[in-house]
Image: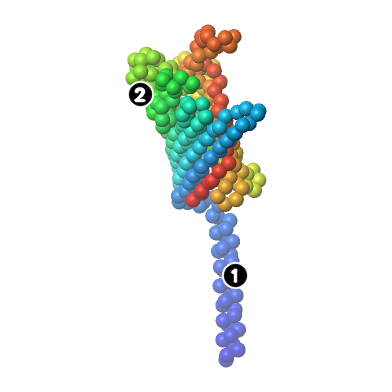
Amino acid sequence: MKSVLVISSLFVLQCVQAQLTDVMSTLKAFTPDTASGWKKNVTLSLNISQASLTNWAAGGRNSLSVNGLFTMDLNYRAVNINWDNSFETGYGIMNQSDGGGFIKTDDRINAATKFGYKVFDKWYFSGLLSLKTQINTGYYYPNDSVVISRFMSPGYFVGAIGFDFKPTDYFSAFFSPVTCKTTFVLDKALADSGSYGVTRGQRSRSEVGGFIRMLYRKDLVENVSVDMRTDFFSNYLKKPENIDIDWELRLSLKINKIMSASISMNMLYDDDVKLEIDSDRDGIVDHRGPRVQFKELFGVGFVLKF
């Protein structure tokens, strides 16, 4: 009798184990495409560099620079829903031994939300809202008495409706044929001078056009990741062939649990932003016009992810 019970128990356990194995196999195959809920990714980094020279025959200046960056991604996934939210703010300062004090090397606030509902395989009908501005006042260095930018001067707000193509979890391309781009210049002095393409005396300028945003975020190899964003905007009503471009790339190398090295690059072209141009480099401004803007930052420092 005991032998029968033991054999029966083993048989039942074998059946249960087989069923559990089948269920787990089904769940493993099912989970990647239907995982739902919120996913958070927060990064805080601080880079510091310093140079000290004493009786240095080759010349140079003492300097100290500090750059901080905070990023947060908060994304929601359901069967037919993708909701991506991102926030990024960075600030950097540098001081040299020329008595000029600290000057800015980085200053940005970027926030965006994109909600999509799946309509075809890998295609989502989506709406996007984004805001881009800065934190502190900017000056026309080396002349620190001339203000050229402030918080929300400029500020760029984009509202767009279109389709989001997401073939993988690390790449997406958002296409919007109907987009409203508004440039804000809330500082009165800058608005009265007609800065950043607004009509003199006005605090904002709106454009209607087409918009494309491409995102690429991936670990290239172990401990090396890339984060790239590219925006294109064409104003339907004024010079649609002159496309505004905002390209940003950040390459990160993890050294250990709390240290990393990073390089970031940002290229901008806005046909409505007129910069002073000295064509013959004689120190006299010849005219004003749009120019390609480029910024690069490199640093080694501390990073926390949670």
**What x and y, as percent, mark residue 295?**
55, 28
- Give the distance between the C-alpha atoms of the residues marked 1 and 2, in whole angstroms: 68 Å
Q: Is residue 74 or residue 78 the one in the foreground?
A: 74
- Residue 181 in view (yes/no): no
Q: Is mark 2 on a helix, strand or loop?
A: loop
Q: Is residue 178 left or right of residue 54?
A: left
Residue lying farthest to the front in this orientation? 55
Residue at the (53%, 46%) spot, across then down: 303
Residue 239 position within the rendered picture, expressed as x and y whole percent measured from the top left: 50, 14
Residue 2 falls in image quadrant: bottom right
How far across and how far down the image is residue 291, in percent? Answer: 54, 18
Q: Which residue sits at x=54%, y=55%?
A: 31
Q: Is residue 279 above or below residue 18?
A: above
Task: Indicate the amino acid at tag 1.
Answer: Ala
Q: Decide which of 59, 159 is in the foreground and name it.
A: 59
Closer mark to the observer between disc 1 and disc 2: 2
Would you call the spot at circle 1 few (<14 residues within 10 Å), some (14-19), or many (20 or more)? few
In front of the other: 222 or 84 = 222
Residue 87 seen: yes
Judge from the rendering whether residue 57 lies leftward or rightward of residue 65; answer left or right: right
Q: In which quarter of the image is residue 204?
A: top left
Please name the residue shown 42% across and 23% down the image: 149
The three-letter amino acid code for the residue at tag 2 is Leu
- The tag earlier along the polypeptide, 1 or 2, is 1
Q: Name the residue under label 1.
A: 18
Q: In this view, does 281 lie to the left or right of 78?
A: right
Q: Quadrant of the N terminus?
A: bottom right
Q: Mark 2 points at which residue?
A: 186
